[in-house]
Image (cartoon, grey):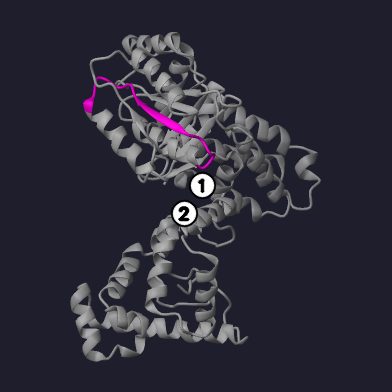
Amino acid sequence: MAFEGLSEKLQKVFQNLRGKGTLSEEDVKAALKEVKMALLEADVNFKVVKNFTKRIEERAVGTEVTSGLNPAQSVIKIVNEELTELMGSEVTEIAFQPGKAITVIMMVGLQGAGKTTATAKMAGQLVKKGKRSLLVACDIYRPAAIDQLKVNGEKVGIPVFSMGTDVKPAQIAKEAIAFAEANDKNVVILDTAGRLHVDEEMMAELKEIKETVTVHQTILVVDAMTGQDAVNVAEEFKEQIGIDGVILSKLDGDARGGAALSVRAVTGCPVLYVGMGEKLTDLEPFYPDRMAGRILGMGDVLTLIEKAQESIDIDEDKGRDMMSRMKKGKFDFEDYLESMRQMQNMGGLAGILKMMPGMGINAADLESQVDEKKMKHMEAIVLSMTPEERRNPKLLNPRRKHRIAVGCGLDIAEVNRFIKQFEQSQKMMKQMGGGKRRGGLFGGMGGFPMGRGPKFPF
């Protein structure tokens, strides 16, 4: 996950600051030296790092900190504010044409950056805003790109306009806009061809499209995993054809985060969305303040809430029924399986914990604290049960447990341990429902694959 290394180093710097009662100018400068090294290692642009740490030093070495009751917290607050400002201060959205006018968006980027996938993902996001989009296949050099766009368009419920590989992209764009006007579409998204690197032929083709049709928004898709190269690509595109915004793809991968922290400062163009997974729903609006909170280990509760609202398919009646069952200690394995799936839709337990402040778990500790393999084992145990056994755990006698162990390929001892821990969780929920709170909400299920961290009664 992007920013993990940076987040860990910054949290270590701030931990050292918290250990001091007061901060001298030397303390602040020493801490900023560590911050500078952490940012450079994260592949943040050198000039950006230099200006960033200079602004922090100007604010931190002075009355703003030295007169504070808690100087360490004051420094953290300043770093948080400057990180937010560096990435754009406020969320930026695509500017649409007013009324019934069609907004034409041209997607550009290098081959392999994930442009075609990002195009479909963005179209899916625009559905939530009430937009009636049309995807347009303007990549005539790679037939697979047309097929990929059609498949992804079908998955997100967006029609795709294509004229094959024998028509020039500019003409395809012109015909697509006429088609959109005739079919009550108000957004046209052009998926253009990419290259392995920026070249004159690609730029000439993009310029021709802009000369043929009115493009209202040009959005560049860059691979976050390429670090500073992504920023350099953004600079070239901005200089030659002009761009209005950036989508960072693959931010969930092994990206150090330099592109996200540098691209706006270097190009002046805002980051609109970030790709956080392979699913077509894994595209998030870019909130600079929330991203700064994640980097500094402060969590991101708002995004967590939004993910819960979007990912958990559960109506109010079903929710009340499940809560009632939990209070009565009737939470069964079917409920457990449903809870596991809901959590997976939200990015898994590790992903959830990273967005929760005050959990006391650093990014570096998550892998050891959260055993995703163990969670898969538990899910396999439940899936090896019959529907009757899931709904009535009392049916699980030794013979049935042995069959379940064979079915999921696990040792009988692990199956017994999981079932026993589940029964203890049921008792705890019943006590909580009866007003006898022991351990609180997170006191729960000992079987959850965690170390000394919180345990969740799923």
| Secondary element type, mark 2 | helix
- Residue plotted at (47% across, 34% down): 132
| Label drawn at residue 7 | 1
- Residue plotted at (34% across, 79% down): 390
Kindly identify the amino acid type of the residue bearing the numbered disc 2.
Ala
* Quadrant location of the C terminus in the rendered image: bottom left
Quarter of the image holding residue 194? top left
Image position of 253 with respect to 97: above or below: below
Report whether 76 appears left or right of 404.
right
Our reading of the magenta stretch's main secondary structure is loop
Q: Toward the viewer: 258 or 173?
A: 173
Q: Is residue 134 magenta?
A: yes
Total of numbered circles in the picture? Answer: 2
Question: Contact, CB < 8 Å: mark 1 with mark 2?
Answer: yes
* Residue found at the very far front of the displayed protein: 182
- Residue plotted at (40% across, 15% down): 174
Image position of 457 with respect to 258: above or below: below
Disc 2: which residue: 363
Q: Residue 104: x percent and y percent?
A: 48, 22
Q: Residues within 10 Å of mark 1 (few under 14, many from 20)?
A: many
| Secondary element type, mark 1 | helix
Magenta segment, which residues?
Answer: 128-143
Quarter of the image holding residue 161? top left
Image position of 325 with respect to 348: above or below: below
